[in-house]
Image (cartoon, grey):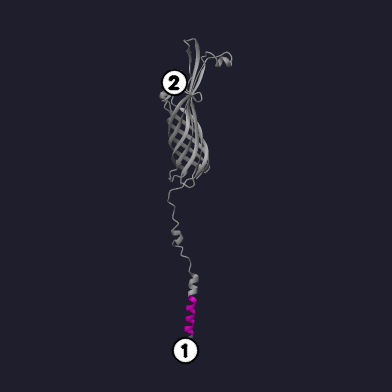
């Protein structure tokens, strides 16, 4: 092969190599995995406030410490000769659900009731000592309410702090009984003529407002425990006796309320996330 032919062959070979090389180079390029992909640059960790959802119901037990100063001075000492301890054990229940369109806001309904029967009352003489009677008295409070709670958006795992308020309607009932021991039952004798046997229930309805803070722990997704503390405030209404009979002036009952400190424990089943 002469020099001219060799030169022509060399140029043809170089030309073909240049045509094929880009395709080979392109085929061998691999994705660079040492850098973030564009989409990964925008998939950062969510550092916003966590959302909370719950729906469930359960039972509540509470210790209520009412202000019984007026109750004791106006009824306790005159009627049974002693002061009642300022404690009422209450039991109730509650159901609730987090609103899906308002983050961490929870609505529910609850009910409570409890009675203080702190009286190992001794017998008392009446009618100038002619009759011996036994006296007994109870203080009862109960209500139903709606609850409005806000779950604080804190990153605390299964533990949540939940401030809230309960608004509702209820009543304080004062049950007073005086009775003689009887040898036999006689309906006419019990409700006719002169008798030392009396039973009355004095009632005042109230509007309830109860700010509270709740500490909730959910060890698993369908079980939750709660410890709460609050102030049970009551705006009292008019006092009546024996299911709605007017009392007229009831100054000795006007200082008796359903207000006081309340601490409760609860256990709930539902869905807690």
Give the residue displayed 47% in from the left and 33% down from the top.
169
**Residue 139 in sight:** no
**In the rendered image, which residue does mark 1 sit on?**
4
**Residue 75 in sight:** yes
Q: Which of the two residues, 263 or 211, is positioned nearer the viewer here?
A: 211
Residue 239 versus residue 180 in the image, above or below: below
Q: Which mark is residue 37?
A: none
- Kindly indicate whether the residue at mark 2 contacts the one at mark 1 (C-beta within 8 angstroms): no
Q: Which residues are magenta?
A: 9-21
Q: Earlier in the sequence, mark 1 or mark 2?
A: 1
Crowding at mark 1 (Cα within 10 Å: few <14, some 14-19, many 20+)? few
Verify whether residue 15 appears in magenta.
Answer: yes
Q: Which mark is residue 75?
A: 2
Q: Which of the two residues, 18 or 126, is positioned nearer the viewer here?
A: 126
Crowding at mark 2 (Cα within 10 Å: few <14, some 14-19, many 20+)? many
Q: Which of the two residues, 109 or 64, is positioned nearer the viewer here?
A: 109
Element marked by disc 1:
helix
Give the residue displayed 49% in from the left and 80% down from the top.
16
- Tell me which secondary structure the magenta stretch mostly adopts: helix
Residue 140 position, x and y percent, is: 48, 26
Residue 133 position, x and y percent, is: 50, 14
Residue 168 position, x and y percent, is: 47, 35
Element marked by disc 2:
helix
Q: Which of the two residues, 53 or 265, is positioned nearer the viewer here?
A: 53
Residue 138 position, x and y percent, is: 48, 23
Residue 188 versus residue 255 in the image, above or below: above
* Structural distance between the alpha carbons of marks 1 and 2: 133 Å
Verify whether residue 41 appears in magenta.
Answer: no
Give the residue displayed 50% in from the left and 77% down from the top.
20
């Amino acid at each position: 092969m002469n020099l001219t032919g060799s030169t022509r062959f060399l140029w043809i070979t170089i030309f073909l190599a240049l045509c094929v090389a880009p395709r080979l180079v392109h085929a061998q390029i691999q994705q660079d995995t040492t850098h973030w992909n564009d989409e990964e640059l925008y998939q950062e960790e969510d550092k916003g406030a966590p959302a909370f959802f719950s729906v469930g119901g359960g039972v509540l037990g509470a210790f209520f410490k009412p202000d019984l100063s007026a109750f004791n001075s106006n009824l306790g000492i005159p009627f049974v000769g002693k002061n009642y301890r300022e404690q009422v054990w209450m039991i109730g229940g509650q159901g609730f659900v987090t609103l899906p369109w308002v983050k961490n806001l929870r609505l529910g309904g609850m009910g409570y009731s409890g009675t203080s029967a702190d009286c190992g009352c001794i017998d008392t003489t009446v009618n100038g000592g002619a009759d011996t009677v036994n006296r007994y008295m109870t203080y009862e409070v109960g209500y139903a309410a709606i609850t409005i709670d806000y779950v604080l958006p804190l990153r605390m795992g299964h533990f949540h702090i939940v401030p809230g308020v309960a608004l509702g309607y209820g009543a304080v009932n004062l049950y007073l009984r005086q009775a003689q021991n009887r040898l036999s039952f006689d309906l006419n004798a019990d409700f006719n003529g002169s008798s030392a046997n009396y039973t009355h229930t004095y009632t005042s309805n109230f509007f309830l407002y109860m700010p509270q803070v709740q500490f909730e722990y959910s060890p698993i997704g369908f079980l939750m425990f709660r410890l709460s503390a609050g102030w049970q405030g009551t705006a009292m209404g008019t006092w009546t006796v024996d299911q709605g009979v007017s009392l007229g002036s009831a100054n000795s009952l006007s200082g008796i309320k359903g207000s006081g400190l309340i601490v409760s424990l609860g256990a709930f089943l539902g869905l807690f996330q």
